[in-house]
């Protein structure tokens, strides 16, 4: 077995959030930070950022053979999860899929959405910039997502307060892929 050490990947990633439909950076700009006008840096993370793509294939069976004849993709779940190390009200707004923020002399506040559960949620886009092979950059974009897992924040005397978050991706359109990966090659 031959191992190419330049293909081994280690290092942190930076997490950005944008509105659903935000202008994506062009592929040739994979080494540059995305435009601040469209993408907000969510700040530091702790314990890494985990990308998961979970695919379900359903078997095709026929009576005439004992083997499975084939399979078709019937479900795909893709997520990014992390712990935000900067538990700000702005980050809370993003991980609770919107809400109302206000500020005044000496204070800021936040209230979550509390309208009917039948209302349309605020979808966002998430962009994860990290390392790829050869210590070049890799970018992963989920084009339509919601934070739909429990959000936790613990205050303890001997550990840092974090916001846990898990963004799940969704179908965009029949002509737009739900996610995209870009690797720099030079």
Image: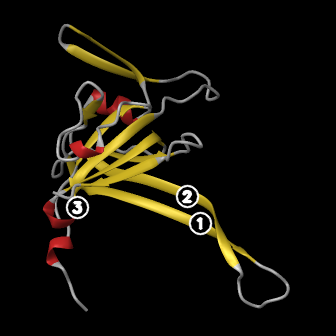
Does residue 11 appear to the left or right of 73 in the view shown?
left
Badge 2 local density, few (<14 within 10 Å), some, or many (20+)?
A: few
Residue 107: x %, y % from top left: 22, 15
Label located before the other in sequence (3 or 2): 2
Labels 1 & 3 near each other (Cβ < 8 A)? no
Badge 1 local density, few (<14 within 10 Å), some, or many (20+)?
A: few
- Mark 2 residue element: strand
Residue 58: x %, y % from top left: 67, 70
Residue 73 falls in which quadrant of the image?
bottom right
What numbered label is drawn on residue 6? Answer: none
Q: Which residue is mark 2?
A: 76
Which residue is the extreme one toward the right?
63
Give me the residue at 56% from left, 44% from top.
Answer: 171
Q: Which residue is mark 3?
A: 132
Label located before the other in sequence (2 or 1): 1
Q: Which residue is mark 1?
A: 56
Badge 3 local density, few (<14 within 10 Å), some, or many (20+)?
A: many
Cα separation, mark 2 vs mark 1, equals 6 Å
């Amino acid at each position: 077995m031959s191992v190419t050490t330049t293909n081994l990947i280690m290092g942190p990633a930076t997490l950005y959030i944008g509105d659903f439909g935000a202008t994506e950076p062009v592929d040739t700009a994979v080494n540059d930070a995305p435009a601040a006008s469209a993408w907000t840096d969510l700040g530091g993370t702790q314990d890494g950022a985990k990308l998961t793509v979970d695919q379900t294939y359903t078997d095709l069976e026929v009576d005439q053979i004992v083997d499975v004849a084939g399979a078709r993709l019937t479900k795909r779940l893709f997520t990014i999860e992390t712990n935000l190390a900067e538990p700000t009200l702005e980050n809370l707004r993003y991980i609770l899929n919107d809400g109302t923020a206000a500020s005044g002399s000496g204070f800021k506040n936040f209230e979550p959405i509390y309208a009917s559960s039948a209302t349309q949620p605020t979808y966002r886009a998430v962009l994860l910039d990290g390392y790829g092979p050869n210590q070049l950059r890799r970018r992963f974009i989920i084009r339509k997502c919601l934070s739909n897992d429990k959000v936790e924040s613990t205050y303890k005397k001997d550990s840092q307060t974090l916001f846990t978050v898990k963004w799940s991706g969704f179908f965009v359109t029949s002509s737009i892929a739900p996610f995209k990966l870009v690797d720099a090659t030079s």
